[in-house]
Image: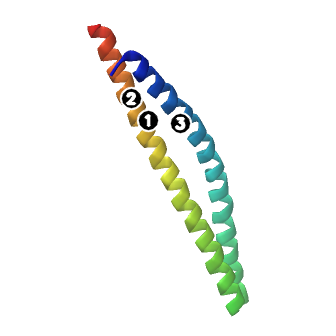
């Protein structure tokens, strides 16, 4: 792979990482909020002992679980991109030392 192609790919990966890290920060805030909401709804359901309270608690938990899955997917994608970035840097370094 030519150095210019490696550089373009590295820039692309870097830009994607910046964007995904920003998304991950938002997802972490959302997850924290939804986890608190789910815990509060669960406590309200325990105190109220009503079917509506149970439904609200389950709904809140479903939202928190969905946010956790999204958060985990973003973390995995960031980790994958970091590995790709490391690989590209290693390849560039190897080409520079041999070129």
Q: Position of residue 88 (x, y in %)?
A: 38, 26
Compared with 33, 37 (above or below) is: below
- Residue 17 is labelled as 3
Per the image, the residue denoted by label 2 is 86
Compared with 12, 91 (above or below) is: above
Location of the N terminus by quadrant is: top left
Q: Tell whether label 1 touches label 2 (CB within 8 Å).
A: yes
Compared with 17, 64 (above or below) is: below
Label 2: element kind: helix
Q: Tell whether label 3 touches label 1 (CB within 8 Å).
A: yes
Compared with 49, 96 (above or below) is: above
Q: Quadrant of residue 79?
A: top left
Label 1: element kind: helix
Categorize mark 1 by other alpha carbons within 10 Å: few (<14), some (14-19), many (20+): some
Q: CA distance from mark 2 to mark 1?
A: 6 Å
Answer yes or no: is residue 46 visible.
Answer: no
Categorize mark 2 by other alpha carbons within 10 Å: few (<14), some (14-19), many (20+): few
Q: Quadrant of residue 66?
A: bottom right
Q: Quadrant of residue 61?
A: bottom right
Nearest the viewer among 61 and 85 is 85
Q: Position of residue 15 (x, y in %)?
A: 56, 32
Which of pointers 3 and 2 lies earlier in the amino acid sequence? 3
Q: Position of residue 59 (x, y in %)?
A: 64, 77
Q: CA distance from mark 1 to mark 3?
A: 8 Å
Label 3: element kind: helix
């Amino acid at each position: 792979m030519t150095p210019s192609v490696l550089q373009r790919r590295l820039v692309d990966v870097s830009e994607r990482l910046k964007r995904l890290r920003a998304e991950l920060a938002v997802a972490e805030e959302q997850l924290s909020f939804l986890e608190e909401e789910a815990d509060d709804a669960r406590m309200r359901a325990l105190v109220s002992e009503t079917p509506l309270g149970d439904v609200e608690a389950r709904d809140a938990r479903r939202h928190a679980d969905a946010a956790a899955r999204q958060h985990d997917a973003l973390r995995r994608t960031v980790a994958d991109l970091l590995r790709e970035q490391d690989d590209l840097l290693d390849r560039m370094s190897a080409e520079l030392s041999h070129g």
